[in-house]
Amino acid sequence: MRLSRYFLPVLKETPAEAQIASHRLMLRAGMIKQASAGIYYWLPMGFKILRKLENIVHEEQQKAGHIPLQMPTLQSADLWKESGRYDAYGPEMLRIRDRQDRDMLYGPTNEEAITDIFRSYVRSYKDLPLTLYQIQWKFRDEIRPRFGVMRGREFYMKDGYNFDLTKEDALHAYNRHLVSYLRTYERMGLQAIPMRADSGPIGGENTHEFLVLAETGESEVFYDSEITELTFGDRQIDYDSHEQCEAVMQEFTSRYARTDETHDEAVFAEVPEDRRRVARGIEVGQIFYFGTKYSEAMGATVQGPDGKQVPVHMGSHGIGVSRLIGAIIEANHDDKGIIWPEGVTPFHVGIVNLKTGDAEADAACDSLYKALEAKGLEPLYDDRDERAGGKFATMDLIGLPWRITVGPRGLKNGVVEVTSRRTGESEEMAPEAAIEKIAGIYAGL
Ligand code: ATP
Ligand code: MG
């Protein structure tokens, strides 16, 4: 993309309404604009990242054998009356009446809708196990929307639902989700720690929230510092193996790590004192096993192997896709701007032309741009007729992890400059070497 043809409305001033870095930087980097409280326009740069995160979520879910579908944002109230949650949900639910006077609502989550699909088609235990998921907009009329996309009213979320014949199978689904979530967050360059949580209005016995540690996080968390040394890395997991998934779950949840809702001082006191941490975190996902609560209320049964009808065991699982952008920025920025991890960056590399209009510099940038594209990479080329300082400031603000700087002086010596946004270190090299270097960094990502 050439910056002169893109739509990147960066702001020079720090918007007064933004209290935390990620919100400030998303506004300044031209990623979002508030439409009304807790509701945002996703401008091209923000939208591009949203799509990248969404793709990662899709890939990791499908690796785990989960099947994508799409449900509508508007739901009929009837389903929620069946489950008993229409009254229970309270003012966070946006209730709408259509022209026929029917009660509708903008879905805050979809347990009822997915159960309706399931009970319409699935009759036999032979059709299980089944996990369906979607990535869709949700609406919750939060009392205090704030921090930009972190706590929006309209937000983008992956929600998945497993249906299993037995509790044991459903717990395997739980563990499988835990594994797939760990992989998802790591691909995004994040460490998200599973913490024992409270199930709230969804109900159920097993639930973990995934938290990214950050000073600006809304949740207070308590954990054994050993947990932060664990990474998933590139271990190969067979998602069908109950043992393998359970082993990962045990490994990642055996140490003390809880949100304030489940925190227990007496148990925490058993952690060696030098490893006890009290900190803040951003909740980027949650998994639940809730047994037969919805299937019993809504008649989601199958015929078991013995011919008897049994309610299915269910769980639900969410990833806050739009909130994750805020979490990634909270964990990856400095005073100049965002620093995207390579796995999620909107463009792989920026090209800064120090002297737009200089025939040689223009030609060198053009050929770099084409060569990078030929390698399957997406460069963002700042071809505007502006001062170098302004171009650097924009690149630093929007946070592309790598920058190639091209100017007449370097070209005389046959070199361009490659700079890491994270370390600020620069290296001069021939344009061909720069292309190889950037391609090498992204190979396998
Ligand atoms: P919270 O406690 O933050 O209100 P929740 O526990 O009610 O969230 P879930 O129902 O577990 O949320 O939704 C799954 C994920 O969706 C959460 O882990 C979070 O990442 C994201 N999410 C929830 N509410 C919001 C919101 N208002 N804005 C942005 N993302 C949200
Ligand atoms: Mg939650």
Image: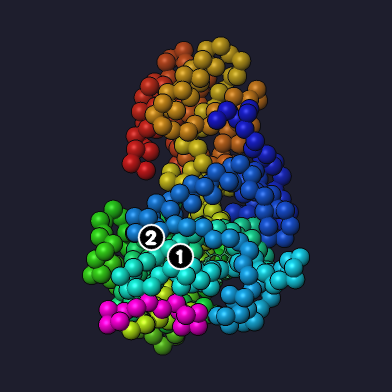
Depicted 438 relative to depicted 188: above or below = above
Residue at the limit of the structure toward the bottom, as seen here: 266
Quadrant of the displayed image that contains ligand 1: bottom right
Residue occupying image coordinates x 50% and y 79%: 298
Q: Which residues are magenta?
A: 295-307
Residue 402: x and y in percent read: 46, 36
Residue 42 visible in this rendered orientation of the protein: yes
Disc 1/disc 2 C-alpha distance (Å): 8 Å
Mark 2 highlights which residue?
66
Residue occupying image coordinates x 58% and y 60%: 72
Near-viewer residue (374 or 367): 374
Residue count near mark 2 (Cα–Cα under 10 Å), binned few <14, some 14–19, many ≥20: many
Residue 41: x and y in percent read: 67, 50
**Disc 1 on helix, strand or loop?**
strand
Near-viewer residue (105 or 57): 105
Mark 1 highlights which residue?
160
Labelled pair 1, 2 in contact (Cβ < 8 Å): yes
For the residue marked with disc 1, what is the amino acid? Gly
Depicted 71 relative to depicted 274: above or below = above
Q: Is residue 103 magenta?
A: no
